[in-house]
Image (cartoon, rainbow, N blue to C red):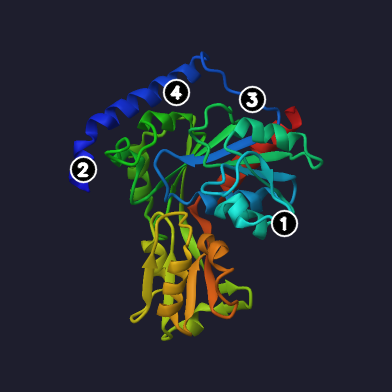
Amino acid sequence: MKLLRKILFPFAVLYGLVTSIRNFLYDIGVLKAAFFDVPVIAVGNLSVGGTGKSPQIEYLIRLLNNNYKVATLSRGYKRQSSGYILAQAGTSAKILGDEPFQFFSKFPTIQVAVDADRKNGIEQLMQSSQEPDIILLDDAYQHRKVKAGFYILLTAYDDLYTDDCMLPTGNLRELKAGAKRASIIVVTKCPENLSVKEQEKIGAKLKITSEQKLFFSSIAYDSYIMGESGKIKRETMQGKKKVLIAGIAKPDSFFDAIKEEGDVCLAYPDHHDFTDKEVVEIKKIAQNNKIITTEKDYVRLKEHFSGEQLFYLGIACSFISGGENFNKTILDYVGTSTRNS
């Protein structure tokens, strides 16, 4: 695989050139971006997958939901539908995509919409009966057709964008210079004991500008596993054989958080759509043992397993330090923008 990526290096150079020209044309106004009066926060990354966008979106929802009418707008990756769709009773993960359906299931008071055309999606949301006060764009850092008022760029601690290169040789969707559009940069999936000295070292490596703010977060795993039949304390599962399933970009942290000797770990591609054959294989492996999966995979698997057998381990974004400053920065932007609009 590494050899193949090296062979494809010329294509990475070409891809980087094309994306740079596109970004330049947007920067100088030759290509026009739509701007909306409503506060719009775009959350995304420079690389392909695995930086923790969903926990960050959920963190923002929890921060804003009590005082504002919040809407999320996603592309709806791998959904079995097209065009603009606003989640409502009876909407499934197949129609919305796994991550938007997760938002819809956990936060019933917000609006959850999907549309590959973010400009049209925002216009549709603004014409809805419950016009939102704030729109969160999920995985829209490269969607230049819309000019968000605030950009949050995520980069994983063990896979910083400064250490990467363009697709297909690396995992970057655009050149590292794209980081300059970010209002905030969050280094995600950090060790909880990350020292101030190492934070400063990473900040220097990322070349944070004076207009940007840098934060460090870690993944906090729930002390319970959750399912339709209720919740179970993780400690009660110790010593019991389990089947762990992850269809996410980087599953190691999930497995490491809960696996014990004797557990079976099954890894699938990100946003994996489980086939009937795979479900049969999982049931054969699991027998009567508990199956624990990620929250994103749970919404696709729960129709195939009983509520007594299938559970998920929830995660949340937790700031190592500066969480109050992060909250204030977001609330100041939303409050000011809402008053201005």
Mark toward the start of the polypeptide (2 vs 3): 2
Q: Give the x, y percent position of residue 159.
A: 33, 48
Q: Name the residue under label 2.
A: 4
Mark 1 or 2, which is nearer the eye?
2
Q: Nearer the viewer, residue 100 or 214?
A: 100
Mark 1 residue type: Pro
Mark 2 residue type: Leu
Mark toward the start of the polypeptide (3 vs 1): 3
The label shown at residue 35 is 3
Q: Give the x, y percent position of residue 78.
A: 51, 48
Mark toward the start of the polypeptide (4 vs 3): 4
Q: Tell me the CA gap for discs 3 and 1.
A: 28 Å
Q: Which residue is drawn at 48% across and 73% down?
A: 292
Q: How many tags in the picture? A: 4
Q: Which residue is drawn at 70% across and 28% down?
A: 37
Q: Tell me the CA gap for discs 1 and 2.
A: 46 Å
Q: Tell me the CA gap for discs 4 and 3.
A: 16 Å
The label shown at residue 23 is 4
Crowding near the residue tagged with mark 4, few <14, some 14–19, many ≥20 C-alpha atoms within 10 Å: some
Mark toward the start of the polypeptide (1 vs 4): 4
Question: Which residue is farthest front?
Answer: 277
Crowding near the residue tagged with mark 3, few <14, some 14–19, many ≥20 C-alpha atoms within 10 Å: some
Picture quarter containing residue 135? top right
Q: In this view, does 283 lie above or below 78?
A: below
Q: Give the x, y percent position of residue 160.
A: 35, 44
Q: Tell me the CA gap for discs 1 and 4.
A: 36 Å
